[in-house]
Image (tube, grey):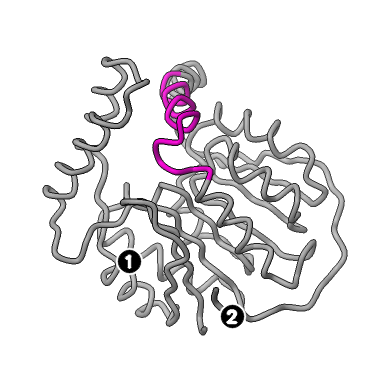
Amino acid sequence: MFAFCHLDTGAPIYCKVTIEIPNRQFMTSAESTAIFTRSWSLYDLITEHNYMSHREIYTGVEDLLRLRSDQGNYHLLDLGCGNARYLAPCLKRLPPALYEGVDLSEAALTEAREYLAELSGRVILTLGDLLHAVESTSKTWNVLFTGFAIHHLMPDEKARFFQAAGRCLSEKGWLILVDVVREEDQNRESFLDGYLKFMREKWTKVPQDQLEEACTHVLDHDYPECLSTLREMAGAAGLNSTRLISRHAQHHTLLFSHSA
């Protein structure tokens, strides 16, 4: 168990859900919905069988949020929120005054609106890129959360992500990062070989065609870093404290903050 800094408490804010869509060019709604529906049905199957330890991970995230003393008064930015299915139950029990979720899929945000409908505070759902969102935000956030998203960024983009996070977090703010992480002596190719082996051996309830589609996605889009690299990027951005909250095989929950 770690000791964490506490913030002042405050009353919850009650407000309706708002979806903000910036003036940018995206795929058509029909294309986005089709891609989301196909990929999310696979994701639901993976999480239903807990292949990526979502149950344990999000129990840990809730336990972590419970340590904050600003219950009902903290502001949380969820970067790459998807449909927020697993974070939403945590937030219902530990409601922020302001939640903003950012994702590239309009269909995912539509589902997220339903999962987040019972939150007592203000909810904003924004269609957009997570790196752009964190770099362009003018708000100060108490919690930044990102789940299984940052490994899609290239190294220079991850460094930019941490720089932006360090800038927009409050003095006692937290960056909670859930993601895959390489071993210190492991290169990308070795990590991917091991992860694909894990997928093909353990994801036994996934239909073969969907499994191969998932494997192709991992090969094409996953660029995980090792913990020391993430710590170095965070430190360069003024996030001098890095804590390993939990580890379930390759799946880590990390907490970054300005100070311990």
Give the crowd class for mark 2: few <14, some 14-19, many >=20 residues within 10 Å.
few
Decide: is 198 above or below 68: above
The x and y percentages for residue 169 are 56, 71
Which residue is depicted at the point 51% across and 66% down? 175
Q: Nearer the viewer, mark 1 or mark 2?
A: 2
Q: Main secondary structure of the magenta part?
A: helix
The x and y percentages for residue 75 are 69, 62
- Label 1: which residue? 159
Question: Gap between marks 1 and 2, in whole Å?
Answer: 27 Å
Q: Secondary structure at mark 1?
A: helix
Which residue is depicted at the point 47% across and 65% down? 245
First of labels 1, 2 by sequence position: 2
| 31 relative to 181 in the view: left or right | right
Which residue is depicted at the point 26% across and 69% down? 229
Q: Residue 162 sits in which quadrant?
A: bottom left
Q: Which residues are magenta?
A: 38-55
Q: Quadrant of the N terminus?
A: bottom right
**In the rendered structure, are the residues bearing label 1 and label 2 in contact, judged by CB atoms less than 8 Å apart?**
no
Mark count? 2
Decide: is 5 above or below 245: below
- Mark number, residue 3: 2
Which residue is depicted at the point 19% across and 66% down? 184
